[in-house]
Image: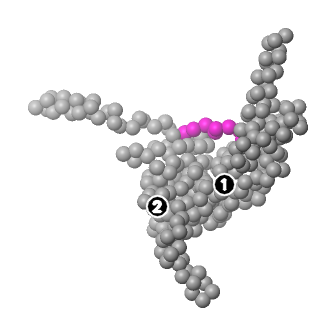
Amino acid sequence: MDAELTRRLMRLLDHVEHWLPPVPEEIDWERDIAALWQRHALGGRLLPVPPRDALSLDDLLGIERQKLALVDNTRAFLQELPANHALLWGSRGSGKSSLIRALLNSLAPEGLRLVQVDRHDLSGLPMLVEQLRHQPHRFVVYCDDLSFEGHDDAYKALKSVLDGALTGPPPNVLLYATSNRRHLLPESLSDNEASQLVGDELHHGDAVEEKISLSDRFGLWLGFYPFNQDIYLEACCHWVTQLGSAHDWGADARAEAIRFATLRGGRSGRGAWQFACHWVGQRRLEDGSRAGGR
């Protein structure tokens, strides 16, 4: 009877084994400076990842105020001083995500560790925070391109971790998020119908209050805006020089950079990088064609 039961259990395990998550790679926070949090049916796991690139804070132009504010806030956190959760919001391609990457590259030697969480995995955020609570390191938990739809309840886990739970976030964890929306949730005209003017004060309705209450839990708000032409061209020059050489930037490159932005309908740091890739790549192709034709 015992042998038959054992055989059945082994067959059952063979059938369900492929549903089990793989054994996670061990995180060594002395060596690993960044990780991805992946939620699964049995909980979640941390996957170590190498830095994406060597982007530095000096590479990011046109956002000096935002850089200074976020670096100061993070350094205070690393030195166990009071610091705020941060929301980086604003126009697309304006440097929000790049600033987080550059921040990690610059402050990892000072003890910064980064854990990125996808919006769809936010329901596992309380579990992640509890895993990090007893670590000796200091962590920024980061969610990129964060926004929610009106029927999306995932933001409740974020609200709870930010400020709503009885225990609150541990002192070694801050949350940073980037978003194109200032309040993270969609805002409609109907939301304002319940707002009232009482004397000289505007009192928002419940729908507006609920939406504002999420972004309000971030103590540091940093706005990012489209570049003007001078800043855009400065960024183009920087990246063309970085990817190629100083000889690649001149009047022709400047005129083409303006045309590139006009065709895309906007100026941004991302657009400057994309132009530099296009310009330097095409010039090197032309140089190779000339050399091959000799």
Residue, x 70% and y 51% (percent of image)? 94
Q: Which residue is mark 1?
A: 91
Residue, x 54% and y 82% (percent of image)? 196
Q: Nearer the viewer, residue 40 or 96?
A: 96
Q: How many marks?
A: 2
Q: Which residue is mark 2?
A: 150
Residue, x 70% and y 47% (percent of image)? 265
What element does badge 1 sit on? loop
Quadrant of residue 78 in the image?
bottom right
Residue lying farthest to the bottom in this orientation: 199
What element does badge 2 sit on? loop
Quarter the C terminus occupies: top right
Q: Is residue 125 found inside the magenta-colored segment of the image? A: no
**How far apart are the two marked residues, 2 and 1, measured between alpha carbons?**
21 Å
Task: Give the magenta part as a residue range.
Answer: 48-56
Mark positioned earlier in the residue sequence (2 or 1): 1
* Mark 1, other Cα within 10 Å: few <14 / some 14–19 / many ≥20: some
Q: Are marks 2 and 1 in contact (CB under 8 Å)?
A: no
- Amino acid at the residue labelled 1: Ser
* Mark 2, other Cα within 10 Å: few <14 / some 14–19 / many ≥20: few
Q: In this rendering, is residue 36 above or below 141?
A: above
Q: In this rendering, is residue 292 above or below 283?
A: above
